[in-house]
Image (cartoon, rainbow, N blue to C red):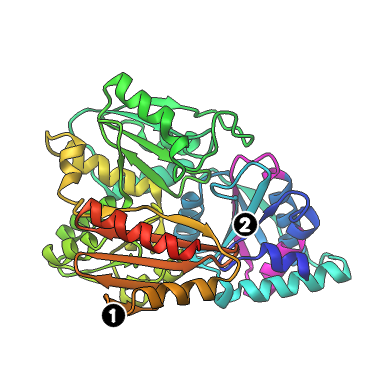
Amino acid sequence: MGDLAKIFKAYDVRGVVPDELDEPIAEAVGAAFVEVTGATSLVVARDMRTSGLALSAAFVRGATGRGADVIDAGLGSTDLLYYASGSLGLPGAMFTASHNPARYNGLKMCHAGAVPVGSDTGLTAIRDRAAELLAAGVRPGPVSGSVTEKDLLYGYAAHLRGLVDLTAIRPLKVVVDAGNAMGGHTVPAVFDGLPIEVTPLYFELDGTFPNHEANPLEPDNLLDLQRTVLETGADLGLAFDGDADRCWVIDERGRSVSPSAITALVAARELAKHPGAMIIHNLITSHGVPEIVREHGGEPVRTRVGHSFIKAEMARTGAVFGGEHSAHYYFRDFWFADSGMLAALHVLAALGEQARPLSEVVAAFSRYHASGEINSTVADQASALAMVRAAFAGRGSFDELDGLTVTGSGWWFNLRASNTEPLLRLNAEAADEGKMAAIRDEVLAVVRS
């Protein structure tokens, strides 16, 4: 089981193809998924990675070999798969490695209604059963299920447009960088008929990522988008990651808009429709988010980092919306699942419903100076955390919901260990940029000593 233990993460499967993830493994996982969940029918989709067709076909063989019927949605974004799972009431499987480099692929699985399959909700059992099947040789059962191809793209697009009214907005000029990934497939369908003039960048599906990796969290991958926004005089720019479940926003000046500001903006819009509702935010988002939620009459709920924690807390509380610092946005009206496209539609609506530029619109939702996430390679994470705890003893309040969070007067930082790499991840924020830089540098000096 060593190889499977390496590629099965907390809430998905991800590995290098074919060294860590290959067709026999995908077939075993497909069979194990059906056995563990008891699924009699399921829906499968894949992104544009070159290994996706073969891996998804192997997964389907494993699932149908255990008697399950499969709806093959073909190419799609991860939020299209969630739409399929929610609207059809079926478990689902999405072949994608999100923002990872081209040599990777992976698998996100969900129960019916887009309920995530994580390590504590079936993923570990699927891993263990798949390992058993691989050891024994995967064999089909006595009854084979059927495979039906179904195009769900335009149903998905119509559903999203039904959640955000864009019919009355002013005309907007938008640059979209799809990174040769699934945004190039979904954006034309979703934006069709809207008063939006799109300048497309890298819409051709190409899993080798010939222009840049589809990872908008890396600043270098935004340079083409920022330049084109300025050259075309666009109202904003949008960048999607590989499976288009995340969206990054660039304002008309070519500057990045913090996902915390987007979280606060969308939260305010959702609270206008659902007064007093709960809004989820992880502990890395700006402290401005809970402040703005309260000012708009909502109830902020703080959670750990990671989409499985966000989704679980949303389901438990009935929150209408949740946001993360990593540009994941979750909606109760979308089966509590995340959709970068739906967040983008909210931004377009907020901009198009009035005359101000985006930089002025988001300024009201940007209150503090943040460091962004800074990684440090550390051999002994626990010792480094203890050293930082000692260095800041008596200077603020401590909590350990996820790593170490220290909050002082007008500043805070969080330092947490990576689950998969020998890294400590630092996020710091302060009301004053100089103070933020001082706290950031002090923590890094201790960690890297």
Can you identify the residue that label 1 sits on? 394
The answer to whether residue 365 is left or right of residue 344 is left
Span of residues in magenta:
27-53
Dot 1 or dot 2, earlier in sequence: 2
Q: Is residue 55 above or below residue 298?
A: above
Q: Quadrant of residue 137?
A: bottom right
Residue type of the residue flagged with mark 2: Leu
Question: Dot 1: within a 10 Å radius of its alpha carbon, few (fewer than 14), some, or many (20 or more) residues?
Answer: few
Residue that appears at 32% across and 19% down = 231
Q: Please tell me whether mark 1 sits on a helix, a strand or a loop.
A: loop
Q: Quadrant of residue 11?
A: bottom right
Which numbered tag is attached to residue 425?
Answer: none
Q: How far across and down, in percent of the image, does residue 437 sit?
A: 31, 54
The amino acid pointed to by label 1 is: Gly
Q: Residue furthest front?
A: 449
Q: Position of residue 240 (x, y in %)?
A: 44, 41
* Residue 115 sits inside the magenta stretch: no
| x then y, percent, for residue 395 | 27, 75
Helix, strand or loop status at disc 2: strand
Q: Is residue 266 visible?
A: no
State yes or no: residue 41 in magenta: yes
Q: Which residue is mark 2?
A: 107
Q: Is residue 124 visible?
A: yes
Q: Residue furthest top?
A: 231
Q: Give how far across and how far down residue 205 sits, in percent.
A: 57, 32
Query: Marks 1 and 2: which is nearer the front?
Result: 1
